[in-house]
Amino acid sequence: MASNSSSQNMKPSPDNSDVKELNKDERIIVIFHLDTNLRNQKLDEICQIAAQCGEKEFQVYMLPENSFNYNASAANGFGIVQNGTKKQLIHDKKVVNAVSEEDGLKKFLEFLRDQTSNNCTALLAAYNCLTYHRYVLIRLLIKYNLLNNFESLVLGFIDTMKIFKEMLPIEEIETEGSSKKTYELKDLAKQFLNYPIPDTIHAKINVEISVSLIEKYKYDIVLMKKHADDLKEFIRYYDLRSTFGVIKKDNKRDAAFEGYLRKMAKAGITVDKVENAYKQDPTNGIPNLLKDPLLSFTPKAIQKINDIVKVCLDNRPPTTRPTSLVVSEPICYAGGRGFDSHPAQMSL
């Protein structure tokens, strides 16, 4: 789906109060979507990546090692068939040419590199990006040691669902006998685009719907600035969460503790800094680190964090963390690619 010229060259907002200052030089927006085999951010394998940047489109099929569950297959139409000793990926019951997950991610990075070749970086935008897509993507980039390459190309993430909620006049839609406002992409496509929706919606269709909505309603850069999330900060949080995240007895994460980890990541605290503080002073090192005014933690919160972190550090083998994240300074500082150091205009 090609973009028109008026939507490609959006002018930066004259308002310079945004702390992220995304309006000084070239920044591109890449709309993307992932299809997966389980719809589970901790276990998912990717079967399709689709993306669009301006008029440039990208799509790759990837063969998961494990089968699809019913919900995932019913939603995206993908599955796996056995052809002799060979497994093949199918979509809507037809075999499609698929590469390995690692090769598919490398092809996606090549697409991003081509789009950012003119001394610019990308912001990746997807529906449910902040709660789902970025977790799956970062986990698998770490698995295949591709995070460094990704970070040299991408500045941050944007969740288009938040933007659609602000920019679109959603009407109440009758759903199973009740009226409610729905922001599902398929419902937005029906209401605002008269888009013919197939029974299964895969990544490429999701990208087409998102791009069409953004083009039709003249996507405002002010909204873009408001909803952009820094990649550096997210990687810090992801590493802290992977290392110290707490699972409760009901198999749900400790939301309050994860809120503390988000604050720590925002203040620039990394796993390495926590480890070093503990090594230098096992009693007071972590509490002193957490007394940073940017954190504004209560004594009770500091005590809780200290207790949990000490247990994790005392019981965790030194090789547990992914190699790509074990560095003296956080990987997210590579190249100085932060919102403050590399602001930009955006074009879709």
Image (cartoon, rainbow, N blue to C red):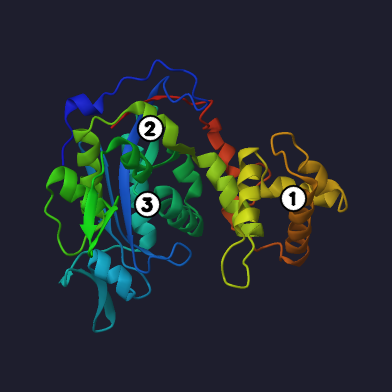
x, y percent for residue 222: 38, 27
Q: Quadrant of residue 154?
A: top left
- The residue identified by callout 1 is 301
Q: SS of the residue at dot 2?
A: helix
Q: Is residue 333 something one can see in this rendering?
A: yes
x, y percent for residue 196: 11, 53
Specify whether 85 is left or right of 6.
right
Which sits earlier in the primary sequence, circle 2 or circle 3? 3
Measure the alpha-carbon separation of dots 1 and 3.
41 Å
Most distant residue in the bottom direction: 84
Measure the alpha-carbon separation of dots 2 and 3.
27 Å
- The amino acid marked with disc number 1 is Ala
Which of the pair 284/25 is nearer the observer? 284
Residue mark closest to the camera, 1 vs 3: 1
Specify whether 222 is left or right of 324.
left
Measure the alpha-carbon separation of dots 2 and 1.
33 Å
Q: Are marks 1 and 3 in contact (CB under 8 Å)?
A: no
**Res. 224 mark:** 2
Q: Is residue 54 something one can see in this rendering?
A: no
- The residue identified by callout 3 is 106
Task: Give the mark count.
Answer: 3
Specify whether 294 is left or right of 342.
right
